[in-house]
Image (tube, helix red, strand yellow):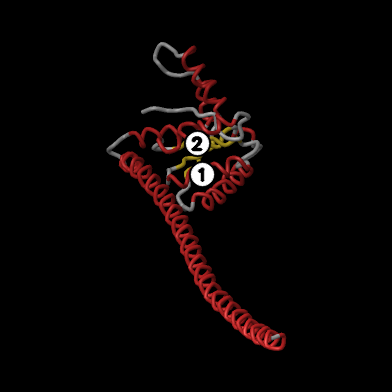
């Protein structure tokens, strides 16, 4: 099992955001850590929506749960997160574990430094561990990693679905690109067809106008030829008459 701690959301550098997003397709399970002092920020909601295009299983960890003053406040926060997560993830099965990472760390440190000869952890460590609420989350992880349990079978299913989801995503992206290219090709074909039709219409119009002006020109030439012939005959007759008079 490989656990990757990504930079998270709402980071200063864009490359850190891209790094987090790039790990999503390769992950079999997403452990989404939410801070109790500001649960489900705008950037977290956007990231959750992004994960759904890869159909990933998300398990929520509500960290700093010890900040709530009583169980009622914690219950209200859990209800709020689950209700919104159902909308964003489009599922009714939302797993959320309220934890205190600080208390869990203190419990582990006390356990390592003060373990008695009989191997039992001292009460201070147990107290911190109880406050951390990490036991339920650990049980989930152990069950998830155990192939003989229901959660373990789900892990195997998710493991197989990961490359399938990536392939589906790639095929979907290719299909979108092909459709866009086809649409552009149809638009280009339509434009070329309209251009050819326009050129043909223009050629027909020019041919008709050419025939018209040719006939018009021939008519004018014939008219002026007739006029010239008429005037020539008249001039010749007048000239002959004048010559006869002079003779």
Q: Which residue is mark 1?
A: 50
Label 2: few (<14), some (14–19) or many (≥20) C-alpha neighbours in 10 Å: some
Residue at the (56%, 25%) spot, across then down: 103
Q: Which residue is mark 2?
A: 21
Q: Foreground: 43 or 140? A: 43
Residue 129: x and y, percent? 51, 26
Whether residue 125 can be seen here: yes
The N terminus: image quadrant: top left
- Distance between the Cα atoms at labels 1 and 2? 8 Å
Residue at the (47%, 34%) spot, across then down: 22
Q: Residue furthest left?
A: 148
Residue at the (31%, 41%) spot, across then down: 160
Whether residue 136 can be seen here: no
Residue 29 is left or right of residue 195, and the answer is left
Q: Is residue 178 above or below residue 28?
A: below
Residue at the (40%, 50%) spot, across then down: 172
The C terminus: image quadrant: bottom right
Label 1: few (<14), some (14–19) or many (≥20) C-alpha neighbours in 10 Å: some
Residue 185 is left or right of residue 155, and the answer is right
Residue 28 is left or right of residue 149, and the answer is right
């Amino acid at each position: 099992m490989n656990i990757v701690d990504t930079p998270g959301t709402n980071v200063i550098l864009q490359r850190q955001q891209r790094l987090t997003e790039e790990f999503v397709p390769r992950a079999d399970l997403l452990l989404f850590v939410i801070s109790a002092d500001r649960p489900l920020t705008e950037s977290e909601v956007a990231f959750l929506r992004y994960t759904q295009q890869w159909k990933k299983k998300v398990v929520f960890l509500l960290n700093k749960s010890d900040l709530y003053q009583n169980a009622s406040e914690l219950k209200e926060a859990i209800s709020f997160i689950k209700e919104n997560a159902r909308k964003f993830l489009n599922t009714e099965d939302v797993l959320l574990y309220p934890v205190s990472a600080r208390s869990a760390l203190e419990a582990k440190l006390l356990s390592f430094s003060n373990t008695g000869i009989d191997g039992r952890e001292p009460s201070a460590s147990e107290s911190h561990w109880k406050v951390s609420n990490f036991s339920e989350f650990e049980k989930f992880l152990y069950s998830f990693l155990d192939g003989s349990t229901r959660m373990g079978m789900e892990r195997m299913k998710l493991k197989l679905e990961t490359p399938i989801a990536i392939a589906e995503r790639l095929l979907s992206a290719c299909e979108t690109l092909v459709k866009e290219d086809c649409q552009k090709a149809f638009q280009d074909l339509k434009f070329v067809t309209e251009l050819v039709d326009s050129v043909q219409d223009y050629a027909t119009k020019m041919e008709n106008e050419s025939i018209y002006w040719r006939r018009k020109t021939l008519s004018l030439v014939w008219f002026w030829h007739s006029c010239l012939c008429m005037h020539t005959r008249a001039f010749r007759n007048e000239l002959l008459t004048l010559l006869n008079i002079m003779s």
